[in-house]
Image: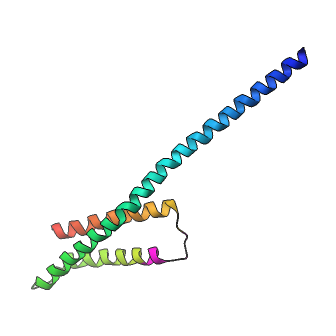
Amino acid sequence: MKKAKQGFDHNKALRIEMSRKLRKSSDRLMESCGWLYNLAEAIDYAPDRIRSITEQLEVLRGRMKRSRRPDGREGNAITSALRKLDEYSRQVKSTKEPLSVLGIMEDAARLEHYQDILADIIDR
């Protein structure tokens, strides 16, 4: 009888442990779903952001063509933004670093940041 109770306790402990592992795996999977949603959103918005940045660059280009004398502060801000955009483009095209979820998320955040920088320059 004692042996049967020990077997029962052992089986119960195994079931409890397996249940805990299943719950933990389910939680991690749900967490990764959030990451994937954010990743998909970042990828989905990237073409629109790039198009918007391109339009902003064209606005600044038109402003430079019409300007009689360049504004030094604005010129410095534009030069800085262009440097950042060029570096971004080089890094995105690089095959030295493999794509990663975090890398793509960081790229999306950088695009949004560059879009904001250009908007600030245009709104001055």
Residue 120 to residue 30: above or below:
below
Compared across the picture, whether 12 is left or right of 96 comes to: right
Compared across the picture, whether 27 is left or right of 15 comes to: left
- What colour scheme has been applied to the protein in the rendered image? rainbow
Identify the residue at horizontal 16%, vertical 82% (top origin).
64
Picture coordinates of residue 4, whole percent (x, y) = 87, 19
Residue 2 to residue 40: above or below:
above
Residue interval drawn in magenta: 90-98
Identify the residue at horizontal 22%, vertical 66% (top origin).
119
Picture coordinates of residue 32, whole percent (x, y) = 53, 49
- Which of the pair 57/79 is nearer the observer? 57
Q: Quadrant of residue 97?
A: bottom right
Quarter holding the C terminus is: bottom left
- Which of the pair 115/73 is nearer the observer? 115
Residue 63 falls within the magenta-colored stretch: no
Residue 92 falls within the magenta-colored stretch: yes
Residue 95 to residue 32: above or below:
below
Picture coordinates of residue 12, whole percent (x, y) = 75, 25
